[in-house]
Image: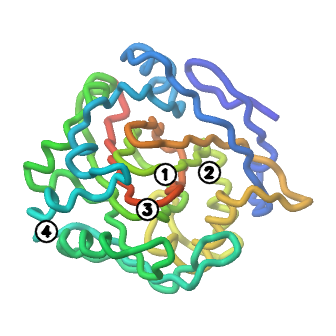
Amino acid sequence: MSLFKAPCGTFPIHRRAITGLRYHTFATWRPVQRLQENALEVFQKTAFECSLPAQLPRKTFENFPASTKWFHGPERKFHTSYLRQFGDVLIPIELTSLLPANDSGSGTATDFERVEAPFGVFLSWAEQVNASSLQRLYVAQAPVARLPKLLQDDLPTPALVVEAGKGDLYDTNIWLGVAPTYTPLHRDPNPNIYLQLAGQKTIRLLEPAAGLSVFSALQAVTKGVASSKFRGDEMMKGMEKRLLEKKIWSDKASKDATEVVGFEAILGAGESLFIPQGWWHSVKSTGGGCTGSVCVKICAVNP
């Protein structure tokens, strides 16, 4: 075991699994640090400047307009009477066709494509779908800058984002779906804050070297040539999708497996997570019902 060094401290990381390309690794998941104070200085010193993940205090995003305007009722369903006025707006949608769920409760993707479709198509599907439906639609990484101004106003830039870095935003995106939803292991070129508007999601993270080792080992097994920086449709279907999901989300280890220490955060509505630049992460919704998330990508370097 060695130490992962950050500007503000160290924490233990088991390095055996990241010194070579071994597919037979498994991760143990430690809770992400939870910040107790809603103060800019605390966030900067314990997370942002250190490049360490952190779950932010709930009051960081109190009264976020989209949380109450886009979702309603005790089951937090999509507030279609409000959202339908934007039904003609084109948004990016992931369309996945699944085989019936296996023993792990996860269906196998037989077809996957990304399309631009009217928002109303997604809303109509969301009103009819259930957890066993084999056709899944997911509004994934929809740029907020392309939404109508009324919807943009429901997603104000958090003060913490403006004040923590250079004050500039790289991008802001939204994710909308009905559980179960899934985003494979990947990394982003900028640090970001992931805010849960509705539903519950679990996010598992690996520090840059550990995540790259898992990805590279997987590419060796599948004889893949995918880029670790620019992930495409290959991570959403086929062998790579199945192996990545098993590697990150199965807690069973084989006899010869070596260990990587990862981190885990469970976000409910109103909770948020800081994901540092270059940290690998995978996201799954848990429970049922509608889910909504906002990801604000911020500039990495202070002025």
**Kind of residue sitting beneath label 2:** Gly
**Kind of residue sitting beneath label 1:** Arg
From the viewer's perspective, tell me whether residue 254 is left or right of residue 292: right
State the mark number for residue 230.
3
Q: Name the residue under label 4.
A: 87
Secondary structure at badge 3 equals: loop
Are dots 4 and 3 in contact, CB under 8 Å?
A: no
Are dots 1 and 2 in contact, CB under 8 Å?
A: yes
| First along the sequence among labels 4 and 2 | 4
- The image position of residue 103, as x and y in percent, is 70, 74
Eyeballing the image, is 175 above or below 153? below
Give the CA separation, mark 4 to mark 3. Answer: 31 Å
Q: Mark 1 points at which residue?
A: 187
From the viewer's perspective, tell me whether residue 106 is left or right of residue 58: right
| First along the sequence among labels 4 and 1 | 4
* Rendered-image quadrant of the C terminus: top left
Secondary structure at badge 4 equals: loop
Q: Name the residue under label 2.
A: 211
